[in-house]
Image (spheres, rainbow, N blue to C red):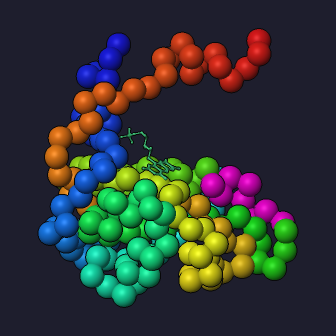
């Protein structure tokens, strides 16, 4: 079996390294992306996610760009929107779990957003290449919340990468256990 048998939304999705710097997302685009994240499954329906959304051309966007690593600075600023992805990890002012699945659930919400973006002719590149301490100082996450990643969303330019590779199904069904 090959990726060709997959639904086109999954087979065609990829994380671009080039975005159209002239393309802007509409308010409706942004709302629909967040709507997709909103409907992701989560443990106990806890929905332990939050998103800081900044459009290119705004002061909020410029502030995020300041915190990008040299690698992501080459491509992320040209995306129409940058999103900071946060998980609700602990109960406020305690070290008790708000949800031990907070990061897992955030990942699913971002995956939903990513597939929705592809359906809209957009594309996402999730990334960790930013100054976490600096971003934390700028955004001051609420107590119990953690910044995990960012997502650049925009209209991709150029061709999809020719050789996206993956581990085999045999490996992914055997590697995780010893017996
Ligand atoms: C949690 C996470 C962190 C990532 N961090 C980075 C990053 O810092 N820089 C980068 O260029 N890509 C980053 N990526 C993108 C991955 O490299 C990319 O998804 C992977 O190579 C598979 O490519 P594809 O999405 O096109 O299938 C990240 C992706 C995820 C899910």
User: Looking at this view, is 72 or 113 the one in front?
Assistant: 72
Residue drawn at x 34%, y 60% is: 74
Quadrant assignment, res 162:
top left
User: Looking at this view, is 152 or 97 the one in front?
Assistant: 152
Viewport quadrant of the C terminus: top right
The answer to whether any part of residue 100 appears in the image is yes
Residue drawn at x 71%, y 64% is: 89
Where residue 157 appears, x then y in whole percent?
17, 52
Magenta-highlighted stretch: main secondary structure?
loop
Quadrant assignment, res 39:
bottom left
Where residue 101 appears, x then y in whole percent?
68, 52
Q: Is residue 113 above or below residue 14?
A: below
Would you say 132 lies left or right of 71 here? right
How many marks are shown on the rendered structure?
Answer: 0
Would you say 47 lies left or right of 6 here? right
Viewport quadrant of the N terminus: top left
Residue sitting at the far bottom:
59
Q: Is residue 41 above or below residue 80?
A: above
Does the magenta segment cover residue 99? yes
Would you say 17 lies left or right of 88 here? left
Q: Is residue 143 above or below residue 173?
A: below
Q: Which residues are magenta?
A: 96-103
């Amino acid at each position: 079996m090959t990726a060709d048998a997959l639904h086109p939304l999954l087979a065609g999705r990829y994380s671009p390294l080039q975005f159209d710097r002239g393309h802007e997302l509409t308010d409706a685009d942004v709302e629909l992306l967040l709507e997709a994240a909103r409907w992701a499954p989560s443990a106990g329906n806890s929905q332990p996610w939050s998103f800081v959304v900044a459009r290119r051309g705004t002061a909020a966007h410029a502030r995020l760009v300041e915190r990008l690593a040299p690698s992501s600075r080459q491509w992320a600023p040209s995306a129409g929107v940058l999103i900071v992805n946060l998980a609700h990890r602990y109960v406020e002012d305690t070290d008790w779990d708000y949800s031990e699945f907070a990061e897992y659930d955030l990942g699913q919400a971002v995956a939903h957003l990513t597939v929705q973006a592809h359906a809209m002719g957009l594309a996402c590149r999730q990334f960790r290449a930013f100054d976490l301490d600096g971003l934390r100082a700028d955004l001051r996450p609420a107590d119990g919340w953690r910044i995990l990643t960012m997502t650049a969303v925009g209209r991709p330019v150029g061709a999809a990468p020719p050789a996206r590779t993956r581990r085999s199904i045999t490996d992914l069904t055997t590697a995780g256990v010893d017996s």
